Image (cartoon, rainbow, N blue to C red):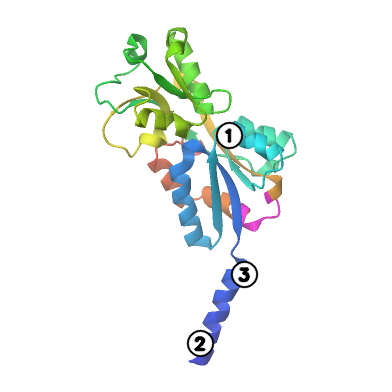
Amino acid sequence: MKTVLLAAALLLSAGAAHAAETTVAVAANFTEPAKEIAKAFTARTGHTAVLSFGATGQFYAQIKQDAPFTVLLAADDTTPAKAVEDGLAVAESRFTYAIGRLVLWSKDPAKVGGEETLKKAAFDKVALANPAVAPYGAAAVQAMKKLGVFDALQPKFVQGNTIAQTYQFVETGNAEVGFVALSQVALKAGGSRWLVPEALHDPIRQDAVLLKKGAGDEAAKAFLAFLKGPEAGAVIAKYGYGTAATN
């Protein structure tokens, strides 16, 4: 019996020795799926992914200033590519983990009814993320310009620093409608929404990349490998994202 207990103790201590922690910068639109994926990752591997959420552009500025992130899950594909170009990330590690969808959303079940909602503009405020740092905000601007409503709606803009803050503007009633990520409302009942046609904006391809600080980090590499797998893929799909394989 003592031999069995000793063997079990040795196995547990060996597992603890190999378990590690890695720090992941996550685009705000991917907050909820990232939390689920990180929990499953820990359960599967024993490693821990410490998540920070924010705007992709702001994260990149921090990474250039030597922020301690090992992995970047961006809201676009250009920032990870730039990180590789600037020598801040590992080139062969970059891949598309999700393709986002833009939604015009309101808590009012009668407020949003397609593109006519934007053309009629029967609201005081429309929320969107800062297009300079948030790809979902840039997509919203592209969509409004293609519909020919940008100039008329601009005085009504309420701008969030991130897509998470943009969602809060609509959730709290500071804006009657807002451009948010489908992932933020995919599991939410009530209200009204319009899934903005992808033809109205550039694809929101969200790439992941291993940063140079994580080049020798086994937990960081394991997290990216897990993100490519079926368990993470099921979570990504649940929140309304497409994947590179399906687009």
Q: Is residue 217 magenta?
A: yes
Write the residue at 46% across / 49% down.
Answer: 35
Label 2 crowd bin: few (<14), some (14–19), many (20+), radius 10 Å = few
The quadrant holding residue 58 is: top right
The quadrant holding residue 118 is: top left
Q: Mark 2 points at which residue?
A: 4
- Secondary structure at badge 3 equals helix
Q: Is residue 113 magenta?
A: no
Label 1 crowd bin: few (<14), some (14–19), many (20+), radius 10 Å = many
In the image, 235 versus 213, the foreground residue is 213
Write the residue at 36% across / 10% down.
Answer: 119
Residue 181, visible in the rendered structure: no
Residue 77, position as x, y percentages in the image: 59, 32
Q: In this view, does 232 lie above or below 6?
A: above
Q: Mark 3 points at which residue?
A: 17
Specify the segment rendered in magenta: 214-220
C-beta proximity under 8 Å, tags 2 and 3: no
Write the residue at 37% across / 25% down.
Answer: 174
Rendered image: mark on residue 56: 1
Q: Mark 1 belongs to which amino acid?
A: Thr
- Secondary structure at badge 1 equals helix
Write the residue at 46% across / 34% down.
Answer: 164
Q: Mark 2 belongs to which amino acid?
A: Val
